[in-house]
Image: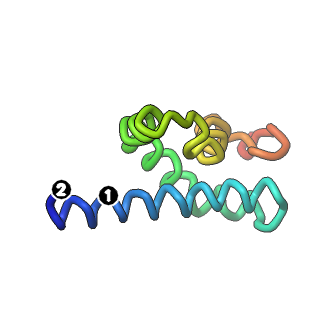
Amino acid sequence: MLKEEKELEEGVVHLLGVLEDVSIAIQTDAADEEILFLSLRGIVIKTTKEFRGYIDYQRKNEDNNFYYIELEKLYDKWKENKSLVTGKSFRP
């Protein structure tokens, strides 16, 4: 693997990890979901879509279907404009 590719992969892993942490923070009430929804929804949706292949590859490669599962939960709710915690709509 080239140095540039390794650095890119490290960046992707870091970004996915941060978004995974956002999901966990919301679920544990350590962060305000509505504020994060307003500021990060687009990033969560786009990043999860863009790196779906990488996430699937990592799950298969490591034989672990739980990789980025918390991010996936967040993505599934936020793409529908719903709260991860309550399931209620953010927008009328």
81 or 53: nearer the viewer: 53
Which image quarter: residue 60? top left
Mark 2 near mark 1, Cβ–Cβ under 8 Å?
A: yes
Q: What x and y, as percent, mark residue 36?
A: 66, 62
Name the residue located 44 percent from the left edge and 49 percent from the top edge. Answer: 47
The amino acid on which the numbered mark 1 sits, given as a three-letter code, is: Glu
Left or right of 53 on screen, residue 37: right
Q: How is the image coloured?
A: rainbow
The amino acid on which the numbered mark 2 sits, given as a three-letter code, is: Met
| Relative height, residue 54 to residue 37 (above, below) | above
Neighbour class for label 2 at 10 Å: few (<14), some, many (≥20)? few
Left or right of 81 on screen, residue 1: left
Comes first in the chain, label 2 or label 1: 2
Q: What x and y, as percent, mark residue 87?
A: 80, 38
Q: Which mark is residue 36?
A: none
18 or 44: nearer the viewer: 18
User: Where does label 2 land, which residue?
Assistant: 1
Neighbour class for label 1 at 10 Å: few (<14), some, many (≥20)? few
User: Where does label 1 land, which residue?
Assistant: 9
Q: Quadrant of the C terminus?
A: top right
Q: What x and y, as percent, mark residue 76?
A: 62, 35
Which image quarter: residue 34? bottom right
| Relative height, residue 25 to residue 52 (above, below) | below
Q: Residue furthest left?
A: 2
Name the residue located 65 percent from the left edge and 46 percent from the top edge. Answer: 70
SS at mark 2 in the image = loop
Q: Quadrant of the N terminus?
A: bottom left
